[in-house]
Image (spheres, rainbow, N blue to C red):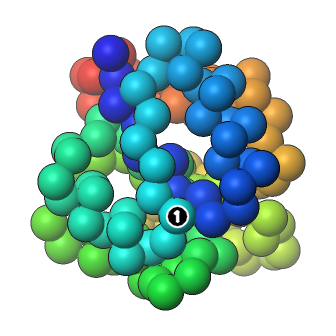
Amino acid sequence: MVKILLVEDNEMNRDMLSRRLERRGFQIIIAMDGEQEVNIAASEAPALILMDMSLPIIDGWEATPRIRTTNQTVPIITLTAHAMAGDQQRAREAGCDDYDTKPVELPRLLEKIQAQLDRIGAA
């Protein structure tokens, strides 16, 4: 079972997405802020991280480079309402491998998850 770390501070978004991914066979670990994400990413070794960028304590813009200092290979997909020009490039510069906007379109997100898992051989 592929382990995904879902980093989302909005309870409704978190519950909806985690249930939908669990029904597709993924094991979901939850973090509600960037500080938890950094700690969980180090201790749980997820195969992939889905990260909101607007988070309390440490936002995704800061958490991603922190994760990259210890783990260069875990795919990180940004899930964000930040859909302004330049946000996708900013996410990539922070260390994210892919970018998707909210509201989440599950078929599109599943394709991105699968592409990243295939890339690292974790599928």
Q: Position of residue 87 (x, y in %)?
A: 70, 73
- Of the pair 1 and 32, the residue shown nearer to us: 32
Residue density around tag 1, few if under 14, some if 14–19, many if 20 or more, within 10 Å = some
The residue sitting at 77% across, 50% down in the picture is 12
Asked if residue 99 shows in the view, the reply is yes
Q: Position of residue 114 (x, y in %)?
A: 50, 23
The residue sitting at 80% across, 64% down in the picture is 81
Q: Position of residue 96 (x, y in %)?
A: 46, 60
The residue sitting at 73% across, 37% down in the picture is 16
The N terminus appears in which quarter of the rendering?
Answer: top left
Q: Which SS class for mark 1? A: loop
- Of the pair 99 and 56, the residue shown nearer to us: 56
The residue sitting at 16% across, 54% down in the picture is 43
Q: Is residue 7 above or below residue 88?
A: above
Q: Is residue 89 above or below residue 59?
A: above
Q: Amino acid at mark 1?
A: Met
Q: Is residue 87 above or below residue 15?
A: below
Q: How many marks?
A: 1
Q: Which residue is mark 1?
A: 32
The C terminus appears in which quarter of the rendering?
Answer: top left
